[in-house]
């Protein structure tokens, strides 16, 4: 495994790879890696000649300073985990000043309102920050394929749109959500939970399963009220949203039709820690 911190070094390596006509896989992460990230890296290793993992806590996608400051970091352990997968992976771990000049300037994108739904309602300019950093990374790495997790499904819709508007020659690969034994989706933010709250957070995925099972029989309003009551009755837990949306546009679904896939999204604040998950209903 080779560690890079400078864009100029990456450029030299990428130009060499491209001149050899080798395929490049990119896995963008914010570090504090877990088995969810590792599943993306493994998939990249299995389908690309050379894999780059970026580890960068992108300040422009945080609307909340405290959330940014609290974001877990563990670069030493991250590098150990990556090198166990394959020696043939490069890691890019730049400083903020390497990715942003003096100001933390973001770009404007036409995301066709995908950025206004769900997380977008609660995290001002979050997807503008995501689009800006992913765009910078795509320009730098010119990846043949880029790997993202279904856990952040709204983000994958944003990247899909970004590829179209910026005409990137990159294939978006969406990888399934990896969960703990209690069903909780793995997330770097889980490190911020107490052991007890981590166990209790199993309710998040259970809620999605409950919704999927009961939607055909009961009204969503009724299901929503039950779920909200149950979640909010737990100490430290607060339901931020629970929504049924179109799988492509992410717009709220008013009436469920049998032949159109939709997705149920949930966000729960656990002692202020933001946990999100989603499930597809076909
Ligand atoms: P992050 O470091 O949280 O920005 O995540 C980096 C990438 O890993 C994103 O594409 C995430 O969607 C993906 N990811 C995070 N958690 C999981 C998980 N539990 N299963 C699969 N992919 C994940």
Image (cartoon, rainbow, N blue to C red):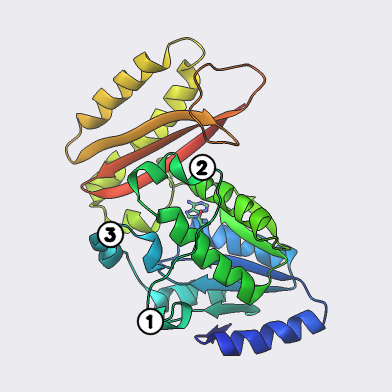
Which quadrant is the N terminus positioned in? bottom right
- Seen at 38% across and 31% down, the residue is 242
Residue 128 is left or right of residue 202, and the answer is: right
Q: Is residue 56 visible?
A: yes
Q: Position of residue 189 (x, y in %)?
A: 34, 56
* Structural distance between the alpha carbons of marks 3 and 1: 22 Å
Residue 70 is left or right of residue 33, and the answer is: left
Residue 197, located in which quarter of the rendered image? top left
Q: Position of residue 252 (x, y in %)?
A: 48, 28
- Seen at 58% across and 89% down, the residue is 8
* Structural distance between the alpha carbons of marks 2 and 1: 29 Å
The residue where tag 1 is placed is 102
Q: Position of residue 240 (x, y in %)?
A: 30, 37
Residue 23 is left or right of residue 79, and the answer is: right
Task: Point out the tag, 2 or 1, that comes first from the N-terminus.
Answer: 1
Assign a secondary structure to mark 1.
loop
The residue where tag 3 is placed is 67
Mark 3 Cα shell of 10 Å, populated few (<14), some (14-19), many (≥20): some
- Seen at 40% across and 41% down, the residue is 182
- Seen at 83% across and 77% down, the residue is 21
Mark 2 Cα shell of 10 Å, populated few (<14), some (14-19), many (≥20): few
Residue 31, located in which quarter of the rendered image? bottom left
Task: Point out the tag, 2 or 3, that comes first from the N-terminus.
Answer: 3
Q: Between label 2 and label 3, give the one nearer the viewer.
A: 2
Q: Position of residue 151 (x, y in %)?
A: 50, 47
Task: Point out the tag, 3 or 1, that comes first from the N-terminus.
Answer: 3
How many numbered marks appear?
3
Which quadrant is the C terminus positioned in? top right
The residue where tag 2 is placed is 113
Q: Is residue 6 above or below residue 86?
A: below
Q: Between label 3 and label 1, give the one nearer the viewer.
A: 1
């Amino acid at each position: 495994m080779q560690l890079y911190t400078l864009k100029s070094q990456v450029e030299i390596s990428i130009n060499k790879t491209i001149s050899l006509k080798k395929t490049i896989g990119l896995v963008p992460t914010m570090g504090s890696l877990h088995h969810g990230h590792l599943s993306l890296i493994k998939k990249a290793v299995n389908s690309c000649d050379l894999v780059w993992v970026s580890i960068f806590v992108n300040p422009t996608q945080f609307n909340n300073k405290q959330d940014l400051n609290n974001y877990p970091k563990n670069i030493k352990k991250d590098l150990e985990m990556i090198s166990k997968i394959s020696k043939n992976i490069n890691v890019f771990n730049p400083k903020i000043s390497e990715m942003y000049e003096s100001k933390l300037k973001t770009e404007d994108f036409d995301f066709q309102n995908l950025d206004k739904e769900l997380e977008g309602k609660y995290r001002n300019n979050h997807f503008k920050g995501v689009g800006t950093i992913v765009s910078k990374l795509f320009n730098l790495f010119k990846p043949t394929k880029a790997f993202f997790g279904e856990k952040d499904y709204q983000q994958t819709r944003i990247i899909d749109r970004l590829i179209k508007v910026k005409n990137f020659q990159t294939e978006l690969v969406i990888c399934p959500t990896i969960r703990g034994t209690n069903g909780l989706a793995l997330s770097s933010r889980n490190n911020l939970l107490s052991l007890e709250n981590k166990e209790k957070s199993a309710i998040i995925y259970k809620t999605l399963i409950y919704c999927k099972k009961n939607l055909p029989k009961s009204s969503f309003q009724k299901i929503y009220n039950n779920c909200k009551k149950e979640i909010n009755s737990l100490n430290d837990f607060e339901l931020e949203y629970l929504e049924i949306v179109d799988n492509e546009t992410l717009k709220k679904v008013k009436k469920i039709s049998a032949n159109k896939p939709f997705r149920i999204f949930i966000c729960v604040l656990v002692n202020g820690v933001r946990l999100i998950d989603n499930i597809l209903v076909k």
